[in-house]
Each structure stands twice: as C-alpha cells, then as structure tokens.
Image (cartoon, rainbow, N blue to C red):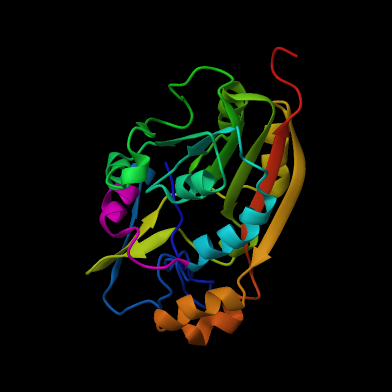
Amino acid sequence: MKRESVLASQGRQAESNRMPDRQPLGRTQEPQAGLETVRVSVREGYKLWAATYDDNPNPLLALEERGLCPMLPDLRCKDALDIGCGTGRWLRALLDRGARSVVGVDSCAEMIGRASKKAFLRNRLILADGLALPLRSRVADVIVCSFTVGHVLNTRVLASELARVVRPRADVFVTDMHPEAQARGWRCAFSRTDQTVEIRTFAHALEDLRSSFDCEGFKLVKSGEFCLGEPERRIFWVAGKENIFETARLVRAVLVLHFRLVQSRTG
C-alpha cells in the first residue's frame, strides 16, 4: 500500500502532485491537452510509479517531513515499523534518529524492489499487506504510517492491526493528504509520457480517523494541519509551477496525527 504524489490540482485553482481539476499531485502540472487520465488500484498505481518514484522532489512529502519530524520521540533503544514504506524514505529517517531496529512493510513488490536496492535497507523489508501484518504481537515501540491511510477503506481494521503489533504506550504517527486538499480536488497521481495515472484513495475526516483509533485503545496525543510554505516553494519553481504556489499554500495540505496506545485489547 501507499505513497503520496507530489503536487495535485486544487480544483480550478491549481494543479500539483495530487492536485486538481482531477490533476495529479505527483508533479505540479496543469492538464495537458490530449493527456489521458486513467484511474487505477493502489497496487497497480504504485507498480507503475515505482521506477520513477524517487526521481522528483515532492512538495507534500517535504511538508510532511517538516511537520512530522518535530513530533518524533527519542528513538534510542526503540523498535520501529514503517507501514506502507514505499521506497524507504522514513526508514532512513528512523535509523538516523537512533532506532534500535527498523522494518518496512509494503504491499507493492515493485516499491519494495526499489527500496531493497538501498544498502541500508537490506534485510529490513517485508512484502505484505498492512492490514494483515506477518509479525508477532507487541513488537514495535513506534510506527510511522505515511500517506497510507488514504488508500484504506476501513480504517478501523488498520487501527486494529497496528494495535496488535505495538507495545503498551507505543507511539503511532499517521499522515495523509488533508481532507481540505482532497475536497479541492487534489489527488494522488503522477504523469507518464502519454497519460496521468490517478491512484484510488478514500477521504477520511479527522474525527473518523480519531474514532477508529480510539476504538482500538489509542489516544490522540497531537494533531497537525500543515500548509505548504517557503521551504516548498523551490519544488514548485523547479517543476515550472511557481505560478500556482501562492494559491496552493493557502490550502491545508497535510494532516499529521500522533496516537499512543493507552489500552491494549487484553486490558
């Protein structure tokens, strides 16, 4: 499962990585005449995207890192999981912050294949569905679930599986494109030579996510709603889309949620 595109279109106002009038966010780009839009499943979408996923800067990913990094706890002596790890972006960050061990899980073989070519990720990757993890219970102190929840229809099932594999008082960080951005037409998509590929997603309101995790014993510790800012301007400029940056920065683009397991299913 997973991963967000870079610039999506914002309804009639702009287009970028997952941006609008049904345009992708994967790059900040406006609709191109004759460019066909195809809508695909999560696995098919990331299969097609894997070969070029790391090639271009993504403003949403940059913004997510800017919002999430300050929330991460001291990871020394802690075991971490990245659910929907894609090509391993957060695994590198977790290791850099001192995690004792890291494991990445993704359901896309092609994304895992790309990640496995990175030396620091050898023997740290699992090809599996995040809703049915092939892991023992209570193995993780920290989980990052980056831009994955939007690809899950039933978030209660995801929350239940995460609750199973974490230890008591574990921290779980969930990020996604903000519902406001989705409402404005931003989409998880990327461009190929002759088409725009839009990957299936589901919009989840903050309260719905909170309810799903609450039912599985988690408490919402902190939430962050982030807009694009000056650090992301250059990404738009390099993509030739600086003209839409001022409009895009007005939209709440990324949602970051920090949950903590306060009550396991066994009490």
Residues 95 and 85: in front is 95
Does residue 12 appear anywhere in the picture? no
**Going by the image, does 115 lie left or right of 64?**
left
Q: Is residue 30 above or below residue 54?
A: below
Residue at (57, 75) in percent of width and height = 231
Quarter holding the C terminus is top right
Magenta-highlighted residues: 45-58
Residue at (36, 67) in percent of width and height = 56
**Going by the image, does 51 lie left or right of 133?**
left
Residue at (60, 32) in percent of width and height = 77
Query: Is 215 covered by the magenta stretch?
Result: no
The number of callouts visible is 0
Image x and y of residue 28, in percent: 43, 74
Image x and y of residue 176, in percent: 57, 52
Residues 103 and 157: in front is 103
Residue at (50, 68) in percent of width and height = 59
**Residue placed farthest to the bottom in the image?**
243
- The quarter of the displayed image where residue 33 is located: bottom left
Residues 101 and 65: in front is 101
**Going by the image, does 70 lie left or right of 235?**
right
Image x and y of residue 52, in percent: 29, 60
Quarter holding the N terminus is top left
- The quarter of the displayed image where residue 54 is located: bottom left
Image x and y of residue 248, in percent: 58, 76
**Going by the image, does 105 lie left or right of 219?**
left
Residues 147 and 11: in front is 147
Does residue 73 appear anywhere in the picture? yes
Q: Is residue 174 above or below residue 132?
A: below
**Residue placed farthest to the top in the image?**
266
